[in-house]
Amino acid sequence: MKKVVVGMSGGVDSSVSALLLKQQGYEVIGLFMKNWEDDDSEEYCSSRQDLIDAVSVADRIGIEIEAVNFSAEYKDRVFSEFLREYRSGRTPNPDVLCNSEIKFKAFLEHAMALGADCIATGHYAQVRENDGKFELLKAEDGSKDQSYFLYRLNQQQLSRTIFPLGNLLKRDVRKIAKDAGLSNFSKKDSTGICFIGERKFREFLNRYLPREPGEMQTPEGKVVGEHIGLTFYTIGQRQGLDIGGPGEAWYVAAKDMERNVLIVVQGHDHPLLFRQDLSCSDLSWVGGEAPHTNWVYGAKTRYRQADAPCSIVGVDGLSCKVDFAEPQWAVTPGQSLVLYESRVCLGGGIIDS
């Protein structure tokens, strides 16, 4: 009997993952990960209730569960990079780093130490072995697909990973949970970054990053407002600019870090909000090798974006340039570019410009 350690968050997805694996004959052990301790209060963090829910589910389906604290690893490998990127004026995606550094590294290492053959999570994605290589595929439920956040996984990690929900629809997952008598079958999905919870994002960042007010200017140099600090804004942002006057809504188009100026434009379709190409670095390829250049792929520059046709026009070590068939809106440095060939996730990198 194969032993699998399932990352259990207290949510319905990971709970059903554990249930399905138990029904399939695996020896299942649940593992609850605590990744954040700073200001871990009832107001912002639900980790206590999440642990209670995870233990309740484990008891219901008859498996062991243990809790492990990865907060030190999280702060060192994920949060420090999160702050470094914001200080440089970029907008990072910590969920990508959390998956590669915590859930599929620290968690995987811990599971192997427990004698596990593999690990499982409640992510909506699929793994397929093809000619000795492991491929990362989109989930059947396109509205829930999370392969975008998993593009940094490598062959060794994928070879030890099971995604039990990859071929299921979310509504079916909740039905399975309800039919099995799991108490969290209707629990609301968690949103946003795990350690931030429901708090106001600006207030959270302000505790770790200083406010450095400066001017908001049009591309022509006209001052139209004042920002509270470039780190608190992202490309394409509309809310929170507080620019009065007539005309269309204002959007963030660029950051001038040297002058501490936020460049803003009017109108969702302003030309400065669109990019025909981009450069990215810190490349990571699922198969271990870069895809062919001058080939048409699908790409996402942000989660929940439809695949945009593009081609890789040059790869230089861990950097590459990508051209799109159509201009892309609000391409944001610090976010991830993820490439696909049909349903297969090839990998990607961090957008530089």
Image (cartoon, rainbow, N blue to C red):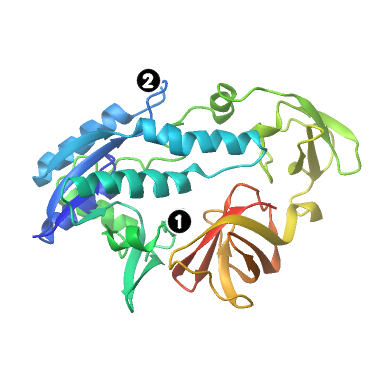
- Residue 57 seen by the camera: yes
**Residue that label 1 marks:** 152
Residue 185 visible within the image: no
- Secondary element under disc 1, as helix, strand or loop, is loop
Left or right: 33 in relation to 319 = left
The residue at 63%/57% (across/down) is: 280
- Residue 271 appears at what percent x and percent y? 80, 56
Answer whether labels 2 and 1 touch (C-beta < 8 Å). Answer: no
Q: Which of 72/247 is in front?
A: 72
Quarter where residue 75 is shown: top left
Secondary structure under the numbered disc 2 in the rendered image = loop
First-in-chain label (2 vs 1): 2
Residue type, label 1: Arg
The location of residue 249, given as percent across then percent down, is 76, 42
Tally the numbered discs: 2
* Residue at 53% in and 65% down: 339
Residue that mark 2 sits on: 41
Task: Say what amino acid the circle numbered 2 marks.
Answer: Ser
> Above or below — where is 165 with respect to 202?
below
Residue 45: x percent and y percent? 38, 27
Q: Nearer the viewer, residue 97 or 20?
A: 97
Q: Residue at x 35, y 21 (%)?
A: 42
Residue 72 location, quadrant: top left
Question: What number is the disc on residue 249?
Answer: none
132, above or below 345, in the image: below
Crowd class of label 2 (few under 14; some 14 to 19; many from 20; radius 10 Å) = few
Mark 2, mark 1: which one is toward the viewer? 1
Q: Is residue 209 above or below residue 102?
A: above
In x, y percent, where is residue 311?
63, 72
Q: At 36% from the left edge and 60% from the top edge, which residue is drawn?
A: 125
